[in-house]
Amino acid sequence: MPKLQETLQHSGVAINHRWSNARLSEICSIIYGYTDSATTEPVGPRFLRITDIQDDRVNWSTVPYCSIDRDKISRYTLLSGDIVFSRTGATTGKSFLVLDPPEAVFASYLIRLRLLEKNALPKFVNYYFQTSTYWRVIAEGSVGSAQGGFNASKLGNLAIPLPSKREQERIIAILDETFEGIAKTRANANRVLTVSIALFESRVAQVFSARGDGWKQQRLDDVCSDITVGHVGSMIKEYRDDGVPFLRSQNIRPFRISLENVVYIDAAFNATLKKSQLRPGDLAIVRTGYPGTAAVIPSDLPISNCSDLVIVRPGPALDPFYMAHFFNSAHGKRLVLGNLVGSAQKHFNIGSAKSVSVPVPSLKQQQQVVSMLDEFRAEVQRLEAVHLQKLESLEALKQSILQQAFSGTL
């Protein structure tokens, strides 16, 4: 018995003995998509790709076209009730139930399943593709593949628990109603968090546009003792298993330094890179990728160096944490984006940083601003933690209901 079949048999899914386990190859036609490039010109049918499937939806009006020969369209046409399956990359296993599509075909990185067995309902099969058991099978079947893929043979060998058509209809009705409620709860939770973040950003914008008594609008280089850039150039041969932390863009998160996946250089090489050496209290700003993202180097990182970051060393009249709030705000990001340079991958350079116009109150007022905004940010982070916990609870509830549905106990 194939390994995937064994995984399903021992998973405890189809414990109802009135149900059968049907392989997908027995109830579906399974084919790979068409190999071609998408085009925005309306020269043929729509050309569905995995990137067009977002939040289990497809906006067909934004799906590009395909210049497929007319004699090949029938083989790759998508019909209502078809299920497409992503077979490679980070989205392996992701599926989508096609309903009432326009004239459309599907791309080669997708596999199309078309049910041939009338007693197997597409929506029931697609609900199975959301279960944790299914995803465990996908993970096990992807091991050893060059790109972590799951091919048509493996997909065809996957078995699903299949009750009578009438029982499938009953289960679908329950799942539809239950998941609609879960979706509404999720949407409300997302809305609350979105509003909270918007209120925080609004408060930050008010602070930096208030121009209270004693506030001055100054260029950043007028209130800093130094603005420079981290080391630029190949470093791969200099990395060590330990030594001096060498920060890169991915180590700079809003308001904090992440040492996850940090690389190191030895002390001798660090000594030769004086210009890019970091000190506690410096502000490190991302140049490329997510330009403007900023964090203050903490006191528990007394020695570090960096690559391709803007290093801002505030003068005595400037609080680095105040500047971190400024650059991480939507207002600061807009200023940074307006000063990006370069053609292929735009970045935030030293000249751009020096010319940024910053609202600067007294040092005491800056510290008061930092205290106030830190309090607001902590509340937003608390709401984000509650939000994440709620989403995890909703997903756990969903999986519990799916487990009941496909074990015949719902």
Image: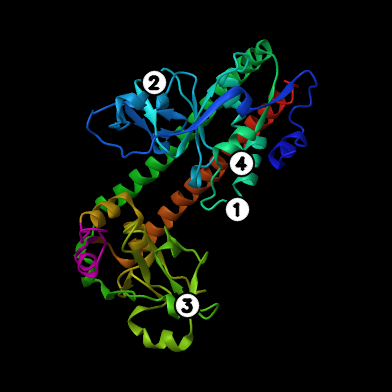
Residue placed under numbered mark 4 in the picture: 138
**Amino acid type for the residue under numbered disc 4:** Ile
On the rendered structure, is 331 left or right of 57? Answer: left
Up the image or down, 267 lies above or below 59; here it is below
* Sequence-wise first label, 4 or 3: 4
The local secondary structure at tag 3 comes to loop
Residue type marked 1: Gly
Ranked by sequence position, the earlier of labels 1 and 4 is 4
Precedes in sequence: disc 3 or disc 2:
2
Q: Residue at x 36, y 25 (%)?
A: 73
CA gap, disc 1 and disc 4: 12 Å
Eye-nearest disc, 3 or 1? 1
- Label of residue 144 in the image: 1
Closer to viewer: mark 4 or mark 3: 4
Question: Which residue corresponds to mark 3?
Answer: 239
Disc 4 + disc 3, Cβ < 8 Å: no
Does 389 sit above or below residue 235?
above
Please tell me which of labels 4 and 2 falls first in the chain: 2
- Residue 398 visible at all: yes
Q: What element carries label 4?
A: helix
Alpha-carbon span between mark 4 and mark 3 = 36 Å
Seen from the viewer's position, the closer of residues 278 and 224 is 278
| Residue 128 position in % (x across, y down) | 62, 28
Disc nearest the viewer among 3 and 2 = 2
Which contiguous range is marked in magenta?
339-358
Q: Position of residue 289 (x, y in %)?
A: 34, 58
Percent across and percent down for residue 76 are: 41, 27
Question: SS at mark 2?
Answer: loop
